[in-house]
Image: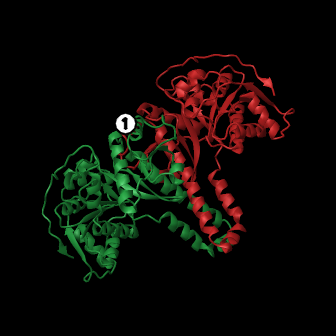
Chain colours: A red, B green
Amino acid sequence: MIAVDAMGGDFAPREIILGAVAAAQQGIPVCLFGDQSVIKKIIVEQKITISHLPLSLVHTTQVIDMGQEPTRAVLDNLDSSLVAAVNAVKEGQCAAVVSAGNTGACLAAGTLMIGRASGILRPAIGNLLPTKKGSVFCIDLGANPDSKPEWLMQFAHMGIAYQNLFFSLKNPRVGLLSNGTEEYKGSRAHKQAFELLKTSHLNFVGNVEPADVLNGTVDVLVSDGFVGNIFLKTMEATGSLVQHFITQTISSSWFDIIWFGLRRSVFKRVKARAMYDQVGGALLLGLQKPLIVAHGCSNAQAIEQAIRFAHKVVQENMIEKFNHKIVPILDIPRTITPAFSSDFNPKEI
Amino acid sequence: MIAVDAMGGDFAPREIILGAVAAAQQGIPVCLFGDQSVIKKIIVEQKITISHLPLSLVHTTQVIDMGQEPTRAVLDNLDSSLVAAVNAVKEGQCAAVVSAGNTGACLAAGTLMIGRASGILRPAIGNLLPTKKGSVFCIDLGANPDSKPEWLMQFAHMGIAYQNLFFSLKNPRVGLLSNGTEEYKGSRAHKQAFELLKTSHLNFVGNVEPADVLNGTVDVLVSDGFVGNIFLKTMEATGSLVQHFITQTISSSWFDIIWFGLRRSVFKRVKARAMYDQVGGALLLGLQKPLIVAHGCSNAQAIEQAIRFAHKVVQENMIEKFNHKIVPILDIPRTITPAFSSDFNPKEI
């Protein structure tokens, strides 16, 4: 069963609920965490019949706001939809969590409750992004601003393990996202990470600029969480800007509206290609159990995709396999014991 | 006269020389700095008649490599094309420098030789980038990785002064580039800069994500040089990726090649719109004289544009006006005296 934080996200709870219903309609067991009166009201409003669906509900009373400082938000809101959903995974009642809420709070809840895998210094967000020659696995895409050099080194190992395991890449090329290919480029922590990577046994190709990454010169892109997040979001924003320019230019003439409208399937194919590897959410790697962070602005379709991805992760034991592979590689053996516990009592809606 | 570093850039000296010749053909006086035998050879090879052009040459014997550590590179290569060009501006023989070489070395040479304007803590690269609603002035786009909070505060003042002076924007909206709009987002230095900006009298709208920026929600975007450079280069790389996807999709069918080929002017207009404010180079703001940093991968056309932009900056006394406006605003009065001096002896080619 996939635990879904119904109250987290820019379009929560409506779009989250619709996404969860769509996933349940495909036979994926889903448990929604959130305010039951709000959830039931939306289901009634949408005239959705759910009696035959594998959909259950856990009532929670609190909501973590996007503006709250993450760790504080988790500690102050133990009966929030996010914390309750993460706890259900920790306790084994659910197999994975999906949340489109406060990313920092997801990280905090995941680290404090589910716990890190042995040896992992910091869990990090990893995902595939499209390039001219396929895709690149990028890590960290937003969990850790001010990443220390040794964390960046671990992100490289995590990215390699991911490409090894799930795409059978034997010796993936690793690049460090930078403002230039020269060795001296980047911030202080970045330069220290460069040294660690350079002296490692990894297939490290050095600093890579965004153009190198999107030209497909690396298989694993390592970055600080702040910079990685700017990279990811700038890609998305630029895609939207280009689409806006194309639409505006075409719209300035009736002839072009008709001419291009007749072949609009081409633009759909371009978009599909850009979204090829998109799964609606990114894995928070380095935890003992699967936590999928969906985009804050996720609509129902994105949430449905994220739940399907979570289901796949569970079905294929991806996190277990990943941790089994990564743990022996890392230097510092350490296990964090989960700190919280609470009751779990899902109800039929 | 515009001093042009003929030896700096990925396609130097050929493209730089061709760009300089094109600018001189429009009547802009240009002085090329570089190896005279190499420059003359290219001019002969290209069968360009230059006797009637306002084009002169200063022979230099050294070249600053892209891989060299910036300050060291400047100090070790005093007879390099870049250092000699910057020195000519310092000494008043030329009015502005254009270089597509090592950005860090441009900054180092500019700071050490031309000197900072009074009160400026760090010169920064500022430029206009396109948005859905016009353009945004972004600073710093690559000069200062690991920017301190007080530098970021000054970048905001510099961006505002630029928008005031050259686009008559009275109270421009200032945003801080971040991985989320929430107050607690960003790196440590970033958060401190947020506090400084929040408590200032500026029209500060808070943290902005790349999508906010490209939707046109701010007039001035402040960022650390590392992050700003990643933002800029990701925009360019994504534009190229989208173009690649469109071309590939269209190319998969003869029908579409013809269908879209007949209206290829639409794509040209989209590209022109995206490049609307592009001037081939960015100003290094905060120096006493104009230094224009062109893209490392500049071709002849980009260099020509950068020289034309430098010419405009000189004609309109932009740097003088800018410094006249910015200096009284800044808190810390300080003048850096240029540290070097050398002979200047331009020859007719």
* Image point (58%, 47%), residue name: A129
The answer to which image quadrant residue B34 occupies is bottom left
Question: Where residue A100 appears, x then y in whole percent?
Answer: 63, 37
Front residue (pair A257, B51): A257
Front residue (pair A7, A27): A7
List the residue tagged with mark 1: A192
Q: Is residue B290 visible?
A: no
Residue B215 left/right relative to A51: left
Q: Chain of mark 1?
A: A
Give the secondary structure at mark 1. helix
Q: Residues within 10 Å of mark 1 (few under 14, many from 20)?
A: some
Determine whether B109 is above or below B54 in the image: above
Residue A36 left/right relative to B123: right
Determine whether B216 is above or below A16 in the image: below
Question: Where residue A160 appears, x then y in whole percent?
Answer: 53, 37
Question: Where residue A104 appears, x then y in whole percent?
Answer: 54, 32
Q: Is residue A102 visible?
A: yes
Residue B44 left/right relative to B195: left
